Amino acid sequence: KNQVEQSPQSLIILEGKNCTLQCNYTVSPFSNLRWYKQDTGRGPVSLTIMTFSENTKSNGRYTATLDADTKQSSLHITASQLSDSASYICVVSAGDTGNQFYFGTGTSLTVIP
Amino acid sequence: KAGVTQTPRYLIKTRGQQVTLSCSPISGHRSVSWYQQTPGQGLQFLFEYFSETQRNKGNFPGRFSGRQFSNSRSEMNVSTLELGDSALYLCASSREGSGSNYGYTFGSGTRLTVV
């Protein structure tokens, strides 16, 4: 069964600390994996897109990793800021043309001062 | 460069009614996809339109339909509304859509409440 699972479900960290969010998937055939950040009441905003051959991709303080062998991805946030408080959603595209989408239920991150 | 615009932002409808939501993509984007987001189910894919043709479809009943116009603007229609249709409906546009590694840009969504 094609699934995307994210952990933890929620996370509270102190401002300035680092954190890592996990995404495990059983989707195949894999096309690409996206991480999105969604602020409350807003639409998701793309952070990174990773294909099968990419291991690491950074976007400012956000660094995503992908291990296609173990079907795991992580999103590492460095030196967290209050504005990082949001839901982070992992989306895996599958199918020969990448036209099937599988969504994780997200990790809710709260950064406190 | 204008983002993805969804209208209206909020909507309250009664069970049994029908509703039409609108999405204007980023200029030059030919793909528009629609999603339903609820606290219990998370984000679920509804359908994708590319150059006025439905290219992909998720597992939603036929009450959910859509269309895309020649200017790439898209509308989504839900007929015979049910309480369970209450959700945030998100639209995303992309230059090429599924099968490519171009990113999707989401709108802010339409919050539909069915009473």
Image (tube, coloured by chain):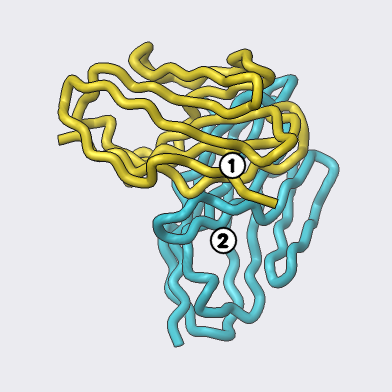
Q: Residue A2, image x and y in percent? A: 54, 28
Q: Which mark is residue A91?
A: 1
Which sits in the foreground, A62 or B28? B28
Which sits in the foreground, B90 or B70? B70
Three-letter code, disc 2 = Leu
Q: Is residue A28 visible?
A: no
Label 1 chain ID: A
Which sits in the foreground, A113 or B10? B10
Dot 2 crowding, Cα within 10 Å, few <14, some 14–19, many 20+? many
Q: Residue B4, image x and y in percent? A: 58, 44
Q: Are marks 2 and 1 in contact (CB under 8 Å)?
A: no
The reply, left or right, for residue B21 in relation to residue B19 is right
| Image quarter of residue B76 | top left
Dot 1 crowding, Cα within 10 Å, few <14, some 14–19, many 20+? many
Q: Residue B73, image x and y in percent? A: 58, 29
Q: Which mark is residue A99?
A: none
Identified at 46% across, 32% down, the residue is: B22
Q: Colour of chain B?
A: yellow
Labels 2 and 1: the sequence-earlier one: 2
Identified at 16% across, 30% down, the residue is: B14
